[in-house]
Image: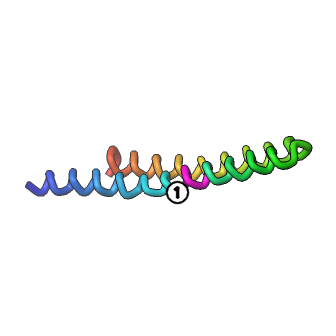
Amino acid sequence: MSGDIIEAAKFIGAGLAMIGALGAGIGIGLSVQGAVQGMARNPDTYGNLFTSMILGVAFSEAIAIYCLVIAFLMLFVL
């Protein structure tokens, strides 16, 4: 009985840990949207905007990967 409660708590905790990936996905979408709009308005700034966009996407994606690692730790280690 208590083992089932612990398993349920692991699944709930892992699901809650992945909420951070939602924020990362929204952040990536907004940064790409802004970069594409900037490139459409001023094509001469393509190189600078593209570099900044890729850097921002990488930082946002790192947060999602951290959330995934925490979720896996909750499921398989604890």
Judge whether residue 25 is colored magenta.
yes
- Could you classify mark 1 by the number of other residues whose Cα lies within 10 Å: few (under 14), some (14-19), or many (20 or more)? some
- The residue that appears at 48% across and 57% down in the rendered structure is 20
Instruction: Name which residue lies at 61% across and 49% down.
Output: 29
Q: Is residue 61 left or right of residue 51?
A: left
Which quadrant holds residue 50? top right
Q: Position of residue 42 (x, y in %)?
A: 87, 47
**60 and 66: which is toward the camera:** 60
Which amino acid does the dot numbered 1 rest on? Gly
Magenta segment range? 23-28
Q: Where on the picture, by quarter, is residue 39?
A: top right
**Is 22 placed left or right of 52 in the picture?**
left
User: Seen from this angle, which residue lies furthest left?
Assistant: 1
> Which secondary structure dominates the residues rendered in magenta?
helix
Residue behind mark 1: 23
In what quadrant of the picture does the N terminus appear?
Answer: bottom left
Q: Residue at x 28, y 53 (%)?
A: 10
Residue 12, horizontal then vertical, whole percent: 29, 55
Secondary structure under badge 1? helix
